[in-house]
Image (cartoon, rainbow, N blue to C red):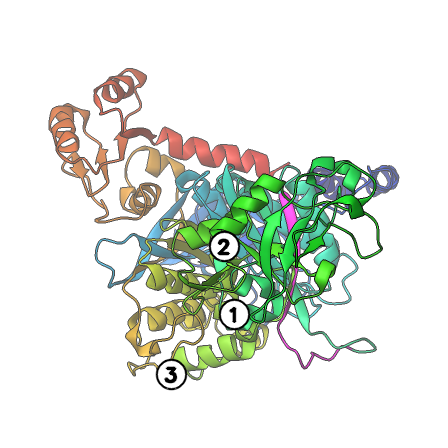
Amino acid sequence: MSRLNDLLRQLRMDNPGLADDLQSEFDALADLRSFGLNFERHVPEAVELPGRKVRKGDKVRALPPRGKNRTAGDDRLWRVVGITNEDGARTASLLSLDDAEDETSVTVDDLVVVAEFRDPIYPGLVSTGKVERGGDKPFHTVINAENFHALQTLLFTHRGKVDCIYIDPPYNTGAKDWKYNNDYVEGDDHYRHSKWLAMMERRLLLAKDLLNPNDAVLMVTIDEREYLRLGMLLEQTFPSARIQMVSTVIKPSGQSRAAAFARTDEYVFFVMFGEAAPRALPLGTEWKIVRDRRAEGLRWTELLRSGSATKRSDRPNQFFPVFIRDTPEGPVFEGVGEPYFGSDTAEIEVPPGSVAVWPIRSDGSEGRWQVSDNALAELISKGYAKLGRWREGRTSITYLKRGEQSKVEAGTFPITDHDTDGSIIVDASDYSPTFVPGTQWRIESHNPEQGGTNLQKALIPNRKFPYPKSLYAVEDALRFFVSDKLDAVVLDFFAGSGTTGHAVMRLNHQDDGHRQSVLITNNEVEADERKKLSDSGLRPGDPEWEQSGICEFFTKPRIKAALEGQTPEGQPVKGNYKFTDEFPLSDGFDENVEFFTLTYEAPLRLASHRDFERIGPLLWLRAGSKGRRIQDVTDGWDVADVYGVIADLDQTEDFLKAVAANDRVEMAFIVTDEDRLFESMVAELPDDVEPVRLYEAYLRNFEIEAGRSAR
């Protein structure tokens, strides 16, 4: 669809009549699309790259004069066909991408390079800082980038390796909360829903290839404005996955809505792949409202069968009498009769002083017991059967199923005594029940004011991030899926202020895990602040502008403050973490994190091994973000903690010896254009070391992804 739109746009410049006729036919065909979620897949998005050097052949936009705001809709794209330099002033000759006859010249300083999402990119990473407090733990990663291009980058480093994705995308409220092709999507935009869906679909398709197909989960939060469309998009994008939606109360008092009920909740979609499923967890007391209270201690089950197959005729041999008698201390078992196949239960002889309890249902019909006569006798002997209040032949009988018996035998519920009827009495004082909650969550800690806004104020005072998530809400959602994965990789490509990374650090603190988070956020400036900066003569790319962006002003300082326990001003963070894991915020975490900015490289320079320092971080990420990073191979090769790089194959022998001497090495990057040399190297590497060819694997990855994005 996007390619057809492009062609129609170009045709309209030369032959408007024919373009209109084709548009009519196109619209008619669009109305006949198949049943399901149908939406306009708009012209692929484009991202401006301030700070990127303008080169011949680049796509660019012309910027308005400093101090002026861009005219709405002035988003024409030009191709740089030449650059001249006279007296230190560099001027670019431009050719319109829409009209081959339209040419102009613009000062290079007044141009910004543009990358459309169907164009191949060759990304690199530049480190902008790090914090190391975690010893040999892997690094968390924060990437300042357009998330679509960052996801393409991760397909080189993390394809199939991600255990969990948690995203909180724009809710498409109609306010200035997100952009499409450099313009804010306003509430009166007739295409705002399809623009939002097109934006989401492109990113979800990339995310699909990052997730481990055998055991991974995607979590997406949303409110009532787009949850129906999002649900259908998830169904269409991930047809083989299992999808559930949880409603979670975030503001019990309600958020006012014009001419509508106040909004108290939002929604979380859980998209589960392969064996992924929520784990039963020992959740705290605040979860009592959503858990089965019968699970808070040893669970005794009614002996009388309920639910399905409850009739005597369903299991005739499980229709038999249980003999009991009353004592001053309470009822006791006297024995278990044999299965009865007759029609008159009165003919059964009852021991003196006893009564018979039969499996009779509340409506008077004949039912059956859950177990056989021999099995019940064994349960009674072990103390695993219990009598209720004396009601003669209507006295209730309960027992312990195998799962509950195993808890007793494992010592989870220590036996302290036996009751009058011989049933066990256990100590449940140290027991924390494990369970999977339902789909309606009303949890105090999930309120974004306490766990979000107030926490942000403590970590980064005087910086107000709009609508931060509750740290504890994200932490709880993650816990259901990564509690038993101490080395899980968790990705958030709408990272905002960095709550997901903070939550992963919290989980590691609780069980000494080595999970790592990968956070992606751009450095977009909030709409009102953007206007102020523009009015003062600043542009994107200027240091004063960039320091006000999301990544630089919120994400990086928040993650650093959480890790170090200090505010950006160097003061200890005040207050304490609450709920699951309580300790002072000023303690910080024993974790490592590094911050990067995505760069856009020239493929010929990369292929000729001239920009290795930009590719070095990608190789380190692919090898697991552990230990020392190789940034320079001018000596021909290097072997770090878990990977090695060789650029001079004349030094193969020394490289192979170094790899063999380090049993932690998992990956070897081999720089060569020759198939024979690469194959020879592969044959000599240890079997447990993965070979990767540079720069073929790198370049091929991004050429393939560009081709896929153009469709």
Residue 86 shows in the view: no
Identify the residue shown where x is 35% and y is 77%: 585
- Between 375 and 639, the one nearer to me in the picture: 375
- Comparing marks 3 and 2, which lies closer to the viewer? 2
Magenta-highlighted residues? 242-257
Residue at which label 1 appears: 525
Q: Earlier in the sequence, mark 2 or mark 1?
A: 2
Q: Amino acid at mark 3?
A: Gly
Residue with the most extreme top position:
676
Separation of marks 3 and 2 at Cα, in angstroms:
50 Å
Identify the residue shown where x is 40% and y is 76%: 577
- Between 20 and 325, the one nearer to me in the picture: 325
- Between 296 and 154, the one nearer to me in the picture: 296
User: Residue 333, position in %: x, y?
Assistant: 58, 56
Q: Is residue 536 above or below residue 624?
A: below
Residue 252 falls left or right of residue 430: right
Report the disc number at residue 383: 2
